[in-house]
Image (tube, coloured by chain):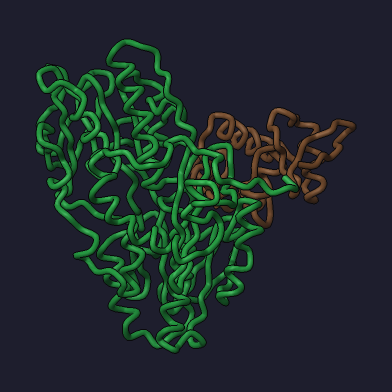
Chain colours: A green, B brown
Amino acid sequence: MKRILILGAGTAGTMMANKLRKILSKETWNITIVDQDEVHYYQPGFLFIPFGIYNRKDVVKPKSNFIPYGVEIIYSAIELINAETNKVTLANGSLLDYDYLIIATGVQTKPDETPGLNGELWYKKIFDFYTVEGSLAMQDFLKTWTGGDLIMAITEIPFKCPIAPIEFVCLADEYFTKKRMREKVNIIFVTPLPGAFTKPIATKMLSTMMADKNVTVVTDYYIEKIDNKNQKLISYDGREVHFDAMAIVPVNMGADVIGTSGLGDDLNLVLTNKNTLRSDKYENIFVIGDASNIPTSKAGSVAHFESEVLFENLMDSINNRPLKAKFDGHANCFVETGFGKATLIDFNYDTEPLPGTYPMTMLGPFSLLKTTWINHLGKLFFRWIYWNILLKGRKLPVTSEMSMTGKVVPADK
Amino acid sequence: MTTTEINGVTINVNDEGYFLDASQWSKDIAVEMAKRESIELTDKHYQVLEFLRNRFLKGETLTMRSIGKSGIVDIKQFYELFPGGPLKMSSKIAGIPKPASCV
């Protein structure tokens, strides 16, 4: 009996378990999936929690609901991956052999990496919306907050869901406007990047967004530490930004086990071939989702598009054929822009977000780089698609490779 | 895309002066790019530029953290070598793309 071992039962791991169990013979292939948490989180929903649009019940379901019959699920932390001997050690001491390993361990937030962040104001005036706890703590806080400087800060790139901080300030603008206290809140977007938007066409089309929503943008800002006593961010070049409340994206790193197992870079991201999705070093290790170091966004849509490429390449590898499928870095994300509207971006390694319609020319129904209410409905409806179609490894009516269908390349490009 | 001329060589750059083709870079060109940012390159500068280029050419993400842990400079020294937005500025001088996100 051979084994495919999947580490991590989040979005990516769950999709692979479903896809593989459908095709691989139960007589020949044992499929085992390991995760330390029994709860599956709909992470795109966390953003809505601080503003009372969603609550805990809207973003959690048991993982077991999505693991297909015939896949063994083990709830345990992972201690060590020995890629030389094809063995994984779990925290409970058991040893798992594998013929193929799929690493889907994602990324986690590490507030301890920034001095002062995990301090006296953590979850009192400083919150992340990358955990249910952080989002709920922020919801409670905002309910009675009377206003002041509200910072949305990013500590380091890369981080999962690069769009979320932009969505946060848009929703905050809407939230305080509806509470008739917008003028009492000074919303400040702090980023280590040169701008809120960094790709040329998106920048041109969305550049007025921050100013229109009265959001101040502070750029090229690398946070050195948080001064809890005086409620200030301090950058490496000595600039200070005062806050009365802060939403922050802490440093994102891969799972600790990747570091201890010697498989990753200095952020514990697994060194992965960006086209085959196979480990650079080990022919029987594949990587999917946020856990890899491939140069595209960390987003659920990327994991979905990767799953089709990984599936084909894994099948080729099992059948001793050369790997043919190539991942093109495809990602797409709805971007909540507040007041019942959203925009949509669709891109890959080589092509920045372009305007147009998606997925069909003219018929759309979604609009790229334009804010529409249909896009907003798409974002909300996506949760149903996630639980019922995506996680179960079923196909969506869009190409896994990015398509130029519906896209309009501006004349001056 | 536009071009700029450095030491008689035509380089393909984007609207902001960042190299579109990292292979067009050389140390001599770096000297000129640095001068345009009012920086005179020292050995330490070159070590950082090589570090950045190596990471970029290997397809690895450039982060402040990785520079701080590189063993070449710590983050404060990085700011001293390339004042202002050091990652932005050093990327330009190193002939690699500006740090960017997805949008």
Residue at the outermost top position: A320
Q: Where is residue B96 shown, x and y percent of the image? A: 66, 38
Q: Determine the image quadrant of residue A400.
A: top left
> Camera-side residue: A204 or A150?
A204
In the image, is A375 to the left or to the right of A385?
A: right
- Residue A230: tell me if it is visible: no
Residue under the image location 63 percent in, 38 percent down: B48
Up-down relation of residue B53 to residue A246 (above or below): above
Q: Residue furthest front?
A: A363
The C terminus of chain A sits in image quarter: top right
Image quarter for residue A265? top left
Screen quadrant of the N terminus of chain A: top left
Occupied quadrant, residue A73: top left
**Residue B15 coordinates in the image, percent (x, y):** 75, 48
A227 sits left or right of A55 in the view: right
The residue at the point 25 percent across, 65 percent down is A133
Residue A229 to residue A385: above or below: below
Q: Is residue A394 left or right of residue A157?
A: left
